[in-house]
Image (cartoon, helix red, strand yellow):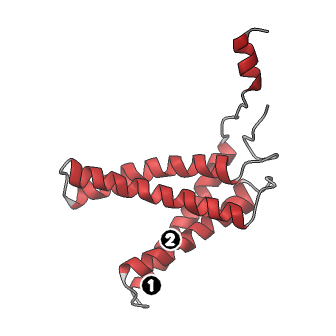
């Protein structure tokens, strides 16, 4: 066996995500977004909280809904679940939020696109797309990795 073949044989391979995994992740994400938005609107409106407190609370609720949706749905066959995985999941989601903020920072302050429309495109458009890719990767490789998972490591 050649040196290249030996390296390929030792390197773990991942399977591509299937339609079922992508659909499950998207469904959990949409439910989380709806919970986040609804709670934020309620906390800002009738409850009367300030925007940062309302967003922090709605973000935690959204993360919890997304984690539950992925743990009980998309990645239900994995054996890795619990407080540690929730902590990692929460960290991955914070990283996604930071990606969205970074996109606004670059667009608004770095490139000078300062209109509300430009901020929306950079944060909710480009930022959300990049953050979703990061969240999907982090969720499947860092949180719900293990035997029985769709796209699990094979060696």
Extreme bottom residue here?
47
Image location (x, y in percent) of residue 137: 59, 46
Crowdedness near tag 1: few (<14), some (14–19) or many (≥20) residues, C-alpha within 10 Å: some
Crowdedness near tag 2: few (<14), some (14–19) or many (≥20) residues, C-alpha within 10 Å: many
Is residue 36 visible to us here? yes
Query: How many numbered marks does the figure carry?
Result: 2
Image location (x, y in percent) of residue 91: 56, 60
Image location (x, y in percent) of residue 84: 70, 63
Q: Is residue 58 left or right of residue 2?
A: left
Q: Which residue is mark 1?
A: 43
Tell me the residue at 46%/75% (across/down). Answer: 56
Tell me the element at label 2: helix
Image location (x, y in percent) of residue 39: 49, 79
Looking at the image, is 15 positioned above or below residue 128? above
Tell me the element at label 1: helix
Mark 1 or mark 2, earlier in chain: 1
Q: Which residue is mark 2?
A: 59
Q: Nearer the viewer, mark 1 or mark 2?
A: 2
Is residue 38 visible to us here? no
Q: Name the image quarter holding the N terminus.
A: top right
């Amino acid at each position: 066996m050649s040196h290249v073949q030996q390296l390929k044989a030792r390197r773990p391979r991942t399977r591509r995500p299937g339609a079922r995994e992508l659909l499950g992740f998207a469904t959990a994400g949409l439910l989380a977004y709806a919970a986040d938005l609804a709670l934020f609107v309620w906390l800002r409106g009738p409850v009367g909280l300030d925007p940062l407190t309302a967003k922090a609370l709605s973000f935690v609720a959204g993360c919890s809904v997304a984690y539950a949706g992925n743990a009980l749905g998309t990645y239900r066959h994995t054996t890795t679940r619990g407080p540690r995985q929730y902590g990692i999941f929460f960290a991955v989601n914070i990283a996604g939020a930071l990606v969205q903020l970074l996109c606004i920072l670059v667009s608004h302050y770095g490139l000078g696109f300062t209109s509300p429309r430009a901020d929306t495109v950079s944060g909710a458009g480009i930022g959300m797309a990049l953050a979703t890719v990061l969240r999907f990767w982090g969720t499947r490789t860092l949180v719900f990795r293990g035997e029985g998972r769709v796209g699990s490591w094979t060696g």
